[in-house]
Image (cartoon, rainbow, N blue to C red):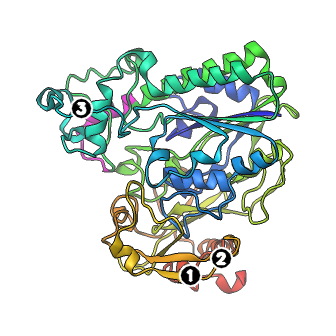
Amino acid sequence: MKTVFVLFDSLNRHMLGAYGGTRIPTPNFDRLARRTAIYDNHYVGSLPCMPARRDMLTGRLTFLHRSWGPLEPFDDAFPERLHKAGVYSHLITDHFHYWEDGGATYHNRYDSYEFVRGQEGDRWKAMVQPHWERLREMYHARQFSPERRTYLAQNIINREFIREEKDFPSVQCFAHAFEFLDANKDADNWLLQLETFDPHEPFTAPERFKAPFDTGWKGAIRDWPRYGRVDELPEECEELRANYYAIVSMCDFLLGELLDYFDRHDLWKDTALVVTTDHGFLLGEHDFWAKNRMNLYQEVAHIPLFLHDPRRPVQGERIARLTQSVDLAPTFLDLFGVAPPSDIEGVSLLRDARREALLYGYFGGAVNVTDGRYTYHRFPKDLRKQDIYQYTLMPTHIFSMFTTEELSNAELSPAMPFTNGARLLKIPVTDRSPMYSVYGPGALLEDTTRLYDLATDPGQLTPLDDPGTEARLCAVMARLMRENHAPPEAFVRLGAPFPGLAAAE
């Protein structure tokens, strides 16, 4: 068995033709859909970027115990398990978060890895004295900063070195993938993870991909929306969206090159192909840009997934059952006949396993549940007064260590059922934590518990008042949280006992 796993970042499901999208031509995603199974009810787990990848690698939801952080010593990542079974794994990525404090243990789980530099705030190119005045004129004020060690400033410097199409990191990632395939396509027992940061912001694409979406914008470069509520003028919003369309078009083109390679070498006969993303991205829907700041709407939580298994090829089959990012790890193990860990929560996509519902969320925010018909988003009564802890043996945030102030109040917690006997640091979350207002409780601009009926309100525009359905979903939520071994305060912060909890017990 051979497997190619293609992971995009922030790829919106509803933009793809296979899922009914019409705004952007996506001929190669459409072509992919004709050769694969298309999963219609695939959802995120933990968010954002690195929490999502921890779910994918371990097959376990992590957001009820931990925010953004590294893989833990007790985590059983699928590349390690494949290695022990004699299956080679190789990672190609330009996702620079792997090399920050909060992601530094992920790439080392693979047998080898290739890192392409230059995306977003990757600390890549060095300019001691940039020509800030010239650069200030080039970029919109909301995506300009001369402050060192900020994503905005480093991105501006990086882009000085990305001029031709061949320089773009995602283009280089796919080029490295073809090098790997040229060298190894005739070998057996390998998994290639081909991952690109695109179409994540900033929405920077070669000019030929931007031309079809020209808005007539004459202002400074505007391709990086702020995380938060929309307050831009309409023409500015259109330019931001057009640049997202351009970068999705580039992703579609690159995917097409991979499909061409599969066709040319007939890899369909012996190579599995999985294509998905970590989460979506709001482009003004619900009056918001991006993610992290708002309720977990469908645009962010409901994501695309395509799968080709050469042993059981299908042609455009639609899969309606509920699936989730945690299902990827057991699927990759299943493809190679490797047994999953005993504490895994995900279910192989190759099995026709049915879920009643699934959980997803951000650490410190709402706990969300869907059964495919309804979505229920239960927030704490007060996000800023909740009692919540990080459970970890790797005390780092996205780009910093835990502060000594945070660690001074840490306790040693007993082992949890999934930590293989390891005791954990139990670290209280405070508003002085570096994560608190970036991707934690202090970042959220919405905090109201809501129920939506996707059948009658697919856009999630009108919350539903249905106590019976809410009680049922609360009971399901409580059961799934218990199965995840959520800590006691996870229930307390949501106002437990939930409606319907007695029935679940």
Quadrant for residue 264, please give it.
top right
Q: Could you tell whether 91 is left or right of 36 in the image?
A: left
> Which kind of residue does numbered mark 3 sit on?
Met
Quadrant for residue 447, please give it.
bottom left
Q: Is residue 480 on the magenta stretch?
A: no
> Which kind of residue does numbered mark 1 sit on?
Ser
Q: Are marks 2 and 1 in contact (CB under 8 Å)?
A: yes
Q: Earlier in the sequence, mark 1 or mark 3?
A: 3
Q: In terms of secondary structure, where does tag 1 sit?
A: strand
Residue at the image position 38 percent from the left and 39 percent from the top: 122
Q: Earlier in the sequence, mark 2 or mark 3?
A: 3
> Disc number at residue 413?
1
Q: State the separation of the CA atoms marked 1 and 3.
A: 45 Å
Per the image, the residue denoted by label 2 is: 416
Q: State the separation of the CA atoms marked 2 and 1.
A: 9 Å
> Disc number at residue 127?
3
